[in-house]
Amino acid sequence: MHIHAKNQEEASNQYTTASRPDLAQKELAEASILKSFLPSPLSDEEIVKHLTDAINQETVHLAASPPSSSSSTHSNASIRHPGALQGRVIKAFWNRVEAGTVPADVVAKKAKELLQSHSPPSSST
């Protein structure tokens, strides 16, 4: 629906440029109706909160997984490959948040930033 509302707004701009205010107003009215059905977007603070909760959830899950567990393969892969952990965090985020409230690329970028800031610095000996 976000795409349809955006398309209607772009059409309105084109109609305005073409000196067709009647059609521009119609497109804006339709975009407004579509937007009324969309969930309200999350703030940056809400995104960070949900991602932090998801990171904590996955960290606890990894720490609680015993080495002999069948899920240990996933756990070990998540530890060795940050991308795997990022994927698990993003999946946990979307389990908490309604789709359409934030663009997926924003979630991926913020998840990566938060994971990098939460990861312990590598020790050089």
Image (cartoon, rainbow, N blue to C red):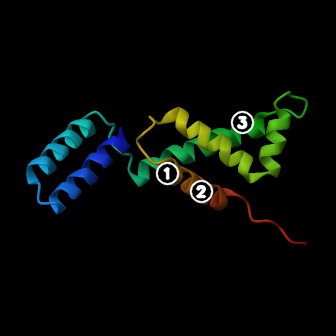
Q: Specify the amino acid type for callout 1.
A: Val
Place residue 101 in its image quadrant: top left
The residue where tag 2 is placed is 114
Left or right of 49? Residue 13 is: left
Q: CA distance from mark 1 to mark 3?
A: 20 Å
Mark 2 vs mark 3, foreground winner is 2
Pick whichever, 86 or 35, lies toward us. Answer: 35
Residue appearing at x 91%, y 72% in the figure: 125
Q: Position of residue 6 (x, y in %)?
A: 31, 48
Secondary element at tag 2: helix
Secondary element at tag 1: helix
Left or right of 44? Residue 9 is: left
Q: Position of residue 19 (x, y in %)?
A: 11, 60
Place residue 74 in its image quadrant: top right
Secondary element at tag 3: helix
Q: Which mark is residue 22?
A: none
- Label pair 1/2, CB-CB below 8 angstroms: yes
Q: Specify the amino acid type for callout 2.
A: Leu
Pick whichever, 81 or 22, lies toward us. Answer: 22
First in residue order: circle 1 vs circle 2: 1
Figure check: 51 above or below 114 = above
The residue where tag 1 is placed is 48
Q: Specify the amino acid type for callout 3.
A: His
Q: Which mark is residue 61?
A: 3
Q: Position of residue 56 (x, y in %)?
A: 63, 43
Q: CA distance from mark 2 to mark 3?
A: 18 Å
Residue at the far left: name it: 22
Quadrant in the picture for the N terminus: top left
Pick whichever, 59 or 82, lies toward us. Answer: 82
Figure check: 15 above or below 121 = above
